[in-house]
Amino acid sequence: MCCCGTKNQTETKQSVTDVVCGMQVDPATAGAAEYRGKSYFFCGAGCKRSFEANPAEYASSQTAVERAGTSDKLTGKQIG
Ligand SMILES: [Zn+2]
């Protein structure tokens, strides 16, 4: 007898940020590259190649993106 339930599949879909274009990508399907022991994921071969051409720039820009997001919240105006 089959024990496979329909709810057996747990949704563990996680998304990571493509450091080149900033897109959210699924690590299961995204292209991956390793840099300094860390894995980076990309929406496509183009972004992967851009990263591999200059990994240091993109790896460090990850923090810059986070800081930009924080400052964006600071400038948010109250609505209503
Ligand atoms: Zn991309």
Image: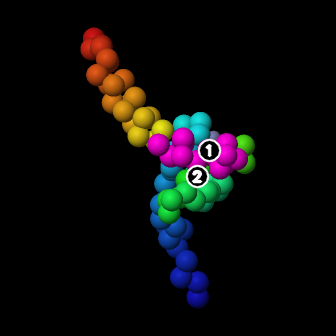
| Residue kind at label 1, given as amino acid type | Asn
Q: Residue at x 30, y 14 (%)?
A: 77
19 vs 73, left or right, is right
Can you tell which mark lies on residue 54?
A: 1
Bounds of the magenta segment? 48-60
Location of residue 46 in the rendering, given as x and y in whole percent from the top left corner: 72, 43
Residue nearest the observer in this picture, 52 or 10: 52
Ligand 1 picture quarter: top right
Answer whether residue 80 is visible to the viewer in this image. Answer: yes
- Indicate which disc, 1 or 2, sits on the residue closer to the N terminus: 2
Crowdedness of circle 2 by 10 Å Cα count: few (<14), some, many (20+)? many
Locate the C terminus and report the quarter of the image it occupies: top left
Which residue lies under the disc numbered 2? 41
Q: Quadrant of residue 19 in the image?
A: top right
Q: Quadrant of residue 72 in the image?
A: top left
Can you tell which mark lies on residue 38?
A: none
Majority secondary structure in the magenta region: helix
Locate the N terminus and report the quarter of the image it occupies: bottom right
| Residue kind at label 2, given as amino acid type | Phe
Q: Residue at x 48, y 38 (%)?
A: 61
Q: Residue at x 36, y 33 (%)?
A: 67
